[in-house]
Amino acid sequence: MSAIRAVRWCCLSQWLTDTRLYRKVSEALLRAQARRRLARIDAAPVNRCQVVALLGMLKQARGTRFGHEHDFRRISSVADYQRLVPLSTPQSLWETYWQPALPEPALATWPEAATQLARVQDADDPMHVPVSPSLGRAHWKALRTALALVSSQSPRHLAGDILFLGPAGSRVDAMLASGAAPLLSSRIRLGREGRAREVGPIPDEIDPVQAVLRSTPTPDVSCILADRERFGRMLYSLRWQTGTRHVREVWPQLSAVVLTDRCPPEGKTVGFALDVDGVEVRQACAPLEGPLALEDRRHDGLRMLGDLDTFYEFIPREELEKTSPARHTLADVEPGQDYAVAFTSPAGLWSCVTGVQVTFEKREPWMLRQIRQETVALRRPSRQQVESEPIPQLDSRPRRVDTPARRPGTIFRNAWSKLVDRG
């Protein structure tokens, strides 16, 4: 009986979300949320947002193997984090933490069981990145911000459905789409027929583009959020199979396309198989390991935001060969300097350098001039250097309220001794 009730409720909710009244009400609410979101990103202090994002991830992952080994419980600032957590790469995390933890690879670095490994092909060195529900929420926070920036020019972008094609293929689309807010998830359509909550994995023998073609006759799509490569392959297949010339012959209500890319190309050229004239095209730099920048036409460029639930560190390009390179935050970057980006994102990536390099145009707001992908090989300190480095004293490390202190001269801690050093 419970299964029958669940099916009935699913049918009822689907019928409700397709009604005209629900569409109008949800459209008005989405517009209000978009205006509030724009006001928030313009007023929020970026540095404070970055610290809050980092401390929140540290608190959530303190019980993992990575959190125990790097003493997450004692980290209370960015300086503590950079001292206790060294720079890493996806390859090093895979060999040390993810591969030994199979079939739940990310549990060693992030405490969410429902995590999938996605292979990033557009990087110079193909790598695996865990995709967790928390990472999906971070990506959809960025995509919701992109929709807010688009809707500020024309509200009709939120009038219809949203077609979503993620950066890692159809198997990961449902995981990323699950991070959308409930009000927005009812409008999301993936690369198959059905809504985001009804979509299952696509078999390996089915081409993702062919799966997209099954849902393309839907005329109610008003906005497309798509990876550039997948969107281009989809338009090429549409022109080859149907003979259409313009994208609005497939989606008459389409008004905006947000193209997510690891490294957005410079310039305004699009170069797709179908004509997109009359459709507003926006850029977004959203690598799978974490969202990075969105096109904000109010400032004429790609803008970095600090509240996308991802913590960024910037290593000067000339210091990548050093054993202990400088690690800057958004507050320390300088325009015109080339930096390699280290991601700390809610998927088990901790100060992870993935080859994304940026150059800033200006600060406040933080605008990017160039984004590129290059192979990065971090230099590890030798054993003699590690042994020669002084070990930090216990008193110099930050203490938290929930961390017991110790009496001077003793080698153990207990719950009664933590009040001794409070004064």
Image (cartoon, helix red, strand yellow):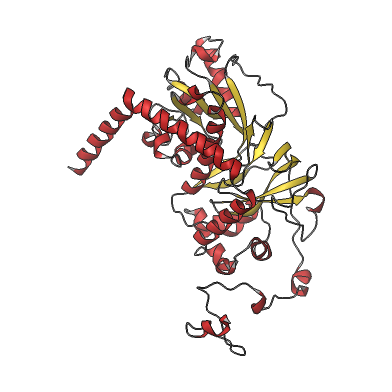
Q: 128 or 79, which is in the foreground?
A: 79
Q: Using residue 382 as the reference point, say whether residue 6 is left or right of it.
A: left
Look at the image and tell me whether residue 290 can be seen.
Answer: no
Which quadrant holds the C terminus? bottom right
Q: Is residue 391 above or below residue 305?
A: below
Q: 284 or 44, which is in the foreground?
A: 44
**Where is residue 10 drawn, in percent x and y?**
28, 35
The single residue placed furthest to the left in the displayed view is 1
**Quarter where residue 266 is shown:** top right
Q: 293 or 35, which is in the foreground?
A: 35
**Where is residue 90 drawn, in percent x and y?**
63, 51
What residue appears at the point 46 percent right and 38 percent down from the top-left corner? 177
Q: Is residue 50 above or below residue 225?
A: below
Look at the image and tell me whether residue 364 can be seen.
Answer: yes
The single residue placed furthest to the right in the displayed view is 318
What residue appears at the point 68 percent right and 65 percent down from the top-left corner? 83
Which quadrant holds the N terminus? top left
**Where is residue 11 drawn, in percent x and y?**
26, 31
Query: How many marks on residues?
Result: 0
